[in-house]
Image (spheres, helix red, strand yellow):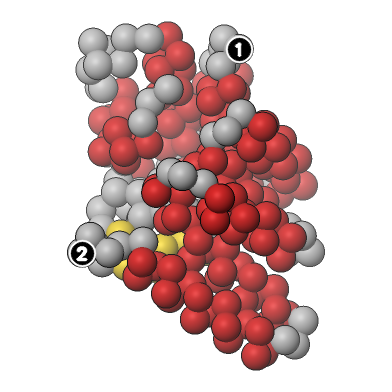
Amino acid sequence: MIAQETLDELWDFTDPVGSEQRIRAADTNRFALRADRNELSTQVARALGMQGRHEEALHLLELIDDGGEPVVLVRILLERGRVLLAASQAADAMPLFEDAAHLAAEAGLDYLAADAMQMAAATDPYAAAEWAETGLAVVDRSRDPLVRRWAPGFHLLLARAMEDQGEDEAAAEQFRLAGESGTAGTAGGGKTAVSRDQTGTATTAEGRNAPDGGRTR
């Protein structure tokens, strides 16, 4: 399994073309394991999807063998869902995000579970509050400090869901928590901002690199 910090180094979500090139050119000695190479391939597919090359991205994902590795399967499901969502196929994307969220949670992959839960919350506004609350529970119990970067996005999704229900006071509290959790997540000095990726998911952004739902989508 590739550390998320390592993947972050390869990504610039404002430049999917450059990111694709960096991921494809990743040192094969550094990523010698088959599972790692397959995991990298899911990120190539993601970069293709962000360029609007949806058919290429989906074809590549079909070719990836998860090899029985939960992390690879979760990433295949997650990236296929993202590509379909970007291609305006939300109804087909949603079950993939749900499957990815459940599988990641069962496998103890908190970071990817939170990623999938945030995508599910952003995809189905009727289920947004439930998924956001579930995601925040993952953030609260996780021992992985990187998982905290998902908290602001979940609070924002909750806030918008509450606004839609006319719960303005509760929504204001969630907006406040989004700001606080964003600041806490960048205590090391990173700049924090709220942004949206190509699927419209609310996230916080820290500097140049970011996974979906974390630093700069």
Q: Which of 121 and 5 is in front in this view?
A: 5
Q: Which of the 4 image quadrants contains residue 190?
A: bottom left
Asked whether the viewer can see residue 19, the reply is no
SS for dot 2 = loop
Q: Quadrant of the N terminus?
A: top left
Marked residue nearer the N-terminal end (2 or 1): 1
Q: Which amino acid does label 2 sit on?
A: Gly
- Pointer 1 local density, CA inside 10 Å: few below 14, some 14–19, many at least 20: few
Percent position (x, y) of residue 176?
Answer: 49, 81
Is 153 on the left-hand or right-hand side of 77?
left
Residue wearing tag 2: 189
* Residue placed furthest toward the bottom: 169
Residue wearing tag 1: 68
Residue plotted at (26% across, 38% down): 9
Percent position (x, y) of residue 102?
Answer: 70, 37
Q: Which of the 4 image quadrants contains residue 62?
A: top right
Percent position (x, y) of residue 86?
Answer: 58, 48
Q: Nearer the viewer, residue 182 or 84?
A: 182
